[in-house]
Amino acid sequence: MGHGSRQVGPIYYFRGQIYAVYPRIVVTGPAGSGKSTFVTSASDEGHSIDRRGTDGGTTTVAMDFGNLRWREFDITLYGTPGHSRFDPLILP
């Protein structure tokens, strides 16, 4: 942190202004890389929308979502679907 700034939990003071800090982490990667596993296991409460594929395995069909409390921060975790058909959701 720079001169004249300080942070107290999720509140950050900088140049006379007060900012709330809401950390968000987006986990991306190819299909089968463990994004859903990470989001659901790292979260205090995580959700993954998976469906069984024709090969018998499961695949994520929507964004994974979870909340994590770390120190004084409430962190939101998001996991993106890994299949190329979902690329328009995450690519510009």
Image: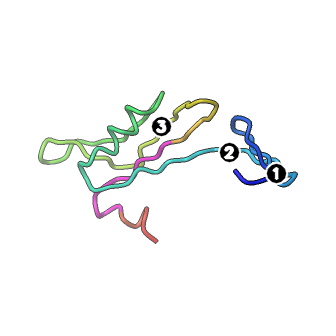
Q: Which residue is under mark 3? A: 66
Identify the disc placed on residue 67: none
Which one is in front, 35 or 8?
8
The residue carrying pointer 2 sits among few (fewer than 14), some (14 to 19) or many (20 or more) residues within 10 Å by Cα, namely some
The magenta region covers 77-86
Near-viewer residue (42 or 4) = 4
Work out how far the residue at label 2 is from the one at label 3, CA to CA, in angstroms. 17 Å
Quickly name the residue at label 1: 4
Q: Could you tell me which secondary element the residue under label 3 belongs to? A: strand
Check the image and report above or below for 78 versus 40: below
The answer to whether residue 66 is left or right of residue 58 is right
Report, in whole angstroms, how far the alpha carbon at label 2 lies from the one at label 1: 17 Å
The amino acid type found where label 2 is placed reads: Val
Give the farthest residue toward the front.
Answer: 3
Q: Mark 3 vs mark 1: which is more N-terminal?
A: 1
Above or below 33: residue 9: above
On screen, residue 59 above or below 71: below
Q: Residue 32: within the magenta?
A: no
Work out whether mark 2 precedes mark 1 in sequence or the reverse, and give the earlier one.
1
Camera-side mark, 2 or 3: 2
Who's the residue at 84% across and 55% down the image?
A: 15
Disc 3 vs disc 1: which is toward the camera?
1
Mark 2: secondary structure = loop
Residue picked out by circle 2: 21
Report x, y in % for residue 6.
76, 44
Q: Tag 1's secondary structure?
A: loop
Neighbours of disc 3 within 10 Å: few (<14), some (14-19), many (20+): many
Nearer the observer, disc 2 or disc 1?
1
Distance of label 3 from label 1 (alpha carbons) = 34 Å
